[in-house]
Amino acid sequence: MAGATIVVTGANRGIGLAFVTEALARGAAKVYAGVRDTTTVTDELRATGAEIVQLEVTDAADVAAAAHTCSDATVLINNAGLHAQDRLVKCSDDEAARREMEVNYFAPLATTRAFAPVIAANGGGSIVNVLSVAAIAPTAFMGGYSPAKAAALYLGGIARAELEPDGITVTSLIVGSVDTQMAAHVDGHKEDPRDIAVAGLKAMQRGDWTADTDTMAFQSRARMALDPVRYERGLGKLLFADALSTKA
């Protein structure tokens, strides 16, 4: 981490803000904090001292401009995400799944394409994709979010193979329920975003291909391996739950 120059997408709050804070605490030389709208930057993000960058990840012009501005980058953390909280087939908004795929899959693909040459030119480095337990099992109550994150998991594996000759590692983070705005509707225990950032940066430094960042991620993978049909059915039943909870 010492001396690294890091770009974080979706940095205004939650896990993105935690990555910014933790990277600086661990000795990063510079952190570029990518935000959708520079006029709505939170006080918490400004207080970190990170360099704020306009970066709406679904906007090709923003992505290209950010790659130019952050020309000294050695690490890219694809954190920006969208959960539309709609069903996939029996949806209320036909376009929700498309938006989720744009933000959660096509956007990290675009930023990876834009920043990989930058990182390679700076001697190599790392790309980290912040995913979800919904990437490793069909999660019915998360509608289009689950397939989009699954696609991003495969993106990480393919990018890893392509970029390895350029000295670039790619790490995919499998993340459980975290205390963020996205999970505000979920009851029960939720992880501290800073703990996710710590786990993610450690996984990156180890060169992990895929890393489970928290207890829910570990347990989800174990249940999926033990009895995938039962686990998927259990996730499906949550479609009809009155409320979502992390409690067993």
Image (cartoon, rainbow, N blue to C red):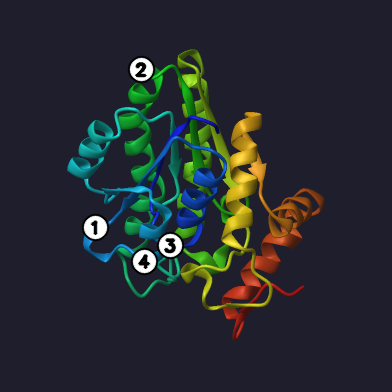
Q: Nearer the viewer, residue 212 or 225?
A: 212
Q: Are marks 4 and 3 in contact (CB under 8 Å)?
A: no
Q: Nearer the viewer, residue 246 or 100?
A: 246
Residue occupying the point 30% across, 62% down: 41
In the rendered structure, which disc, 3 or 1, sits on the residue that comes first in sequence? 3
| Residue closer to the observer: 44 or 147 | 44
Residue that lies at the very extreme toward the right in this rendered image: 226
Please state the horizontal and vertical placement of residue 23, each as a whole percent of the image: 52, 44
The single residue placed furthest to the left in the displayed view is 61
Quarter of the image holding residue 47?
A: bottom left
Left or right of 66? Residue 231 is right
Sequence order check, earlier mark of 3 and 2: 3
Q: Kindly tell me whether residue 198 is visible in this rendering.
A: yes
Element at badge 2? helix
Residue ID for mark 1:
38
Q: Identify the disc placed on residue 121.
A: 2
Residue denoted by label 3: 13
Identity, as a three-letter code, of the amino acid under mark 3? Arg
Quadrant placement of the N terminus: top right
